[in-house]
Amino acid sequence: MLPRRVRLSLLAVQVVSVLTLLRSIAFDRWITVLASLLLIGGAMAARRGKAWGIGLTFATAVWFPVAFAIGIAPAWFCLVGLVAALPFAFTLRPFARFDKGATALLAGIAAATGTAIALAWKEMAVSIFQIIPSLAPTGVAQHGLLVVTTLLVVLGIASRSRLREAPEEARVRVGDRVRIGASSNEPATATATAELEDEAEHDVSNVARARRRAL
């Protein structure tokens, strides 16, 4: 089971991603819709113990502040990127202990991928909007039905995921209690065993003294 701070950071990523997703659908920011879905998918995979989920989340996290830096996104994208980078930051040390080289390679590939996609989108966005005008962003909120439907679908998926994780968490808690109970009972068991051995030795010595007296 993942450490508590990693689980909380992944939950924060999912919450921020859902809010960004709903806003992006409403204002026709379809590239941001895709980025939000990647964040949600990566966080869900990471919650299930998939290392590639952490890498996907980090790569997408890099895209947000880079998009702001090159002038194609608002400043609050930096906050989204910061929150999305937390799971990787919290797992960086365990990854490095396992394999420093692979961890550095993963970080480099993720950062380079997020940066490259942001730069490529800046170059291609105008041409894509000219070819497919319906993909061009608008400044007016719309798609209310789609936004509500998306929210309900996300809540349903989150509920099902939580139901799957609940039995595993219960098993972990029970296992911890059993281990704690076993460790707390070990001193008492050792003491009882020592007392029985002392009583046995005392009985043997009494029998030996009785035999000597009889002789």
Image: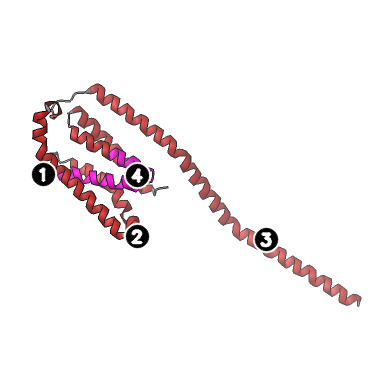
User: Mark 4: which secondary structure?
Assistant: helix
Name the residue that disc number 2 marks: 97
Could you tell me residue 210's position as x and y percent? 86, 73
Q: Earlier in the sequence, mark 1 or mark 4?
A: 4
Distance in Å between CA atoms under marks 3 and 1 = 73 Å
Q: Residue at x 23, y 43 (%)?
A: 60
Residue at figure coordinates x 72%, y 63% from the top left: 196
Quick one: label 2, few (<14), some, or many (20+) residues within 10 Å?
few
| Nearer mark to the viewer, of 3 and 1 | 1
- Residue 212 percent location from the top left of the image: 87, 77
Quarter that holds the C terminus: bottom right
Vertical arrangement, residue 197 with respect to residue 45, above or below: below
Disc 4 target residue: 46
Q: Residue at x 26, y 36 (%)?
A: 37
Name the chief secondary structure element in magenta.
helix
Check if mark 1's residue and mark 4's residue have beta carbons within 8 Å: no
Magenta run includes residue 135:
no
Residue 167 in picture, x, y percent from top left: 48, 39
Sequence order check, earlier mark of 4 and 3: 4
Question: Of label 3 and label 1, which has the lower sequence position?
Answer: 1
Q: Which residues make up the magenta segment?
A: 39-68
Question: Disc 2 and disc 1: Cα gap in Å?
Answer: 35 Å
Mark-to-mark CA distance, 4 and 2: 19 Å
Q: Sort mark 4 into few (<14), some (14-19) or many (20+) by Cα contacts within 10 Å.
A: many
According to the picture, the residue beneath numbered tag 1 turns out to be 70
Query: Distance of mark 1 from mark 4, alpha carbons?
Result: 29 Å
Residue at the farthest right position: 215
N-terminal of the pair, mark 2 or mark 1, is 1
